[in-house]
Image: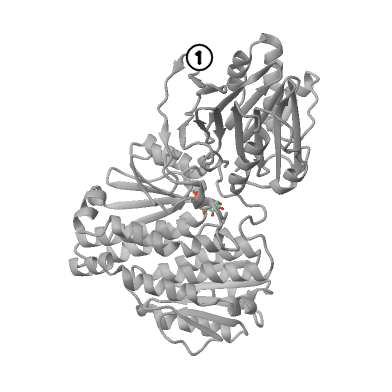
Amino acid sequence: MCGIVGYIGKEKNALNILINGLKALEYRGYDSAGIAYFNKNKIITIKEKGKIEKLEKIIDYSIESNIGIAHTRWATCGDATKINAHPHSCGKITIVHNGIIENYDELKEQLQKDNYKLISETDSEIIAVLLNKYYEEYNDIIKAIIKTKQIIKGSYAIAILCADINDKIYAIRKDSPLIVAKNENASFIASDVPAILNYTNKYTILEENEIAILSNKDISFFNNELQPIKKKMLTFKGNSIDAQKGHFKHFMLKEIFEEKDIIEKIIKKYNTIEKLEKKLGFLTKYDNITIIGCGSAYHVGLIAKYLLEEYANIPVNIEIASEFRYKNNFLNKKSLAIFISQSGETADTLASLREVKKDKIDTLGIVNVQESSIAREADKVIYTEAGPEIAVATTKAFIAQLVIMNLITIYMGNKKGKIKIEDLNEILTNFDNLKKQIENILNNSYKEIAKKIYQAQNIFFLGRNIDYGIAMEGSLKLKEISYIHSEAYPAGELKHGTISLIEKNMPVISIVTKEHIFDKTISNIKETKARGSFNIVISNKTVNDCDINILVPNINPILQPILVTIILQLISYETANLKGCDIDKPRNLAKSVTVE
Ligand code: G6P
């Protein structure tokens, strides 16, 4: 949800560093982009509508500068136009902002009454205006920052340049992520670590209400009372190569192909009962679980609900974070609240975590990004360790979350006496079989399936029980990247109204893997066929009454969702590819949603 970068160093290649940093953050939004840098003691701003490559075309890299800030935008307040692109300036102040200023309307009204002219439609411009107003009043940038912080409400990570001070960048944040990094020649700020990995892996996280002042020699940190604070530098363990496409046409395809190695890596960490005991032993004290997440992370929760209830006999409630945070919850001392999030920064998931913590309920984060807010604030964290995920639509992080939930299921199932130790060991040690089945799926082509569906206006996904959870994710993936409207429905529910939408040749993709309800779902598929639909059935048994039957290898039912999900990811990918969509950066989306 908007990416910001700042650089100040001894080298005069700020433009290059800023643009490279933005490219690594483009997953956070790509409606418009801009940079501001000092040149001969003047701040120069360049911005452009559209993706960073458009901005890059108008940048003259021969211009020397050793200090600048930059932004890639996911529009929240104001259209995706050049005027609304960041940086925003007022008088001597230039800023970039990630977040939302919630009291924007009231501040705008007040400033307009005082004859301030706003140029853009953004809430962010208000920050520049306020900073400049108080800078003029106090002639002290820090005092202006503190005063502005007292006035603005909402979420923000802000980088600030002041035209009178050409050797410092100022940064503040509240509820939006910001890291501060260093090497021997330079200091950096960024919304996320990949932006700085080409230059350093030493960073720290700016905490709520702290102020950072960056120079080319050092970084100083202060609290709200302006007392200096010492911060520990962290070392990022990944590398920038992980964030390169290699020979794949898209990051999404590369990330789907990485899934089998990620699954192997995770399972190896937990492959004995002793290891499970050590890492998951705390789970046995709970008698009910609530899982909270957004988007695909919510779908992992949905699949996990079916798994945990069936194989571990524990009631599971699942909640969409943006709904959960504003309603009563009925958690108690025997409840565990699990927060699933790839980024660890999703605003609604983070806010839900904070709500639950207020009630002193135990919390567990299942998170991909190290040291992200959810990882730091949850009582316990399990890292999914899927590596940096670049494609906006999640694939490998989803699979990694699913594997963690699989492991939680078998561990709790064993403790509850529902899963025998032999079966548990079989899942933990017979990874080769799963790997072979994944390889077979990856070696198949789903182009022919894509050809059958890519021109459709509407598609249904059907399934019962856990297959419904998988259908939800399959449908979301297709919508996100191919822009085909699709709905996922519990197969038995379709007839209560929605079946009226079935038209001749409308694709219906059904998932049928659960033995005890196999015939029930097949009957529902026939009901759509009788109304002219084109039926694709993904099943672990041969199905005759359909147009295309994709056979998925029959493996342990706890692991079965992994295989079906990979097939659905590949179908979505091929469909979007055939339509010529921008697969890694679908329109209107952002990977890390740090606003409500
Ligand atoms: C965005 C992404 C989705 C993701 C959701 C939750 O909407 O586009 O792919 O599932 O956020 O993200 P999280 O980082 O919390 O898993």
Colouring method of the image? one colour
Vertical position of residue 167 compared to residue 261: above or below: above
Which residue is tagged 1? 226
Q: Secondary structure at mark 1?
A: loop
Q: Left or right? Give the position of 142 relative to 125.
A: left
Question: On the image, which quarter does residue 476 sit in?
Answer: bottom right
Write the residue at 50% across / 30% down: 183
Q: Is residue 489 visible?
A: no
Front position in the image: 509 or 109: 509
Vertical position of residue 29 compared to residue 415: above or below: above
Residue 385 in the image, given as x and y percentages of width and height = 40, 51
Write the residue at 66% across / 63% down: 483
Question: On the image, which quarter does residue 63 sit in?
Answer: top right
Vertical position of residue 234 compared to residue 386: above or below: above
Q: Is residue 511 visible?
A: yes
Residue 400 in the image, given as x and y percentages of width and height = 41, 57
User: In the image, what residue type sits under mark 1?
Assistant: Leu
Front position in the image: 410 or 115: 410
Residue 168 in the image, given as x and y percentages of width and height = 61, 21
**Other residues around mark 1 within 10 Å, as few (<14) / some (14–19) / many (≥20):** few
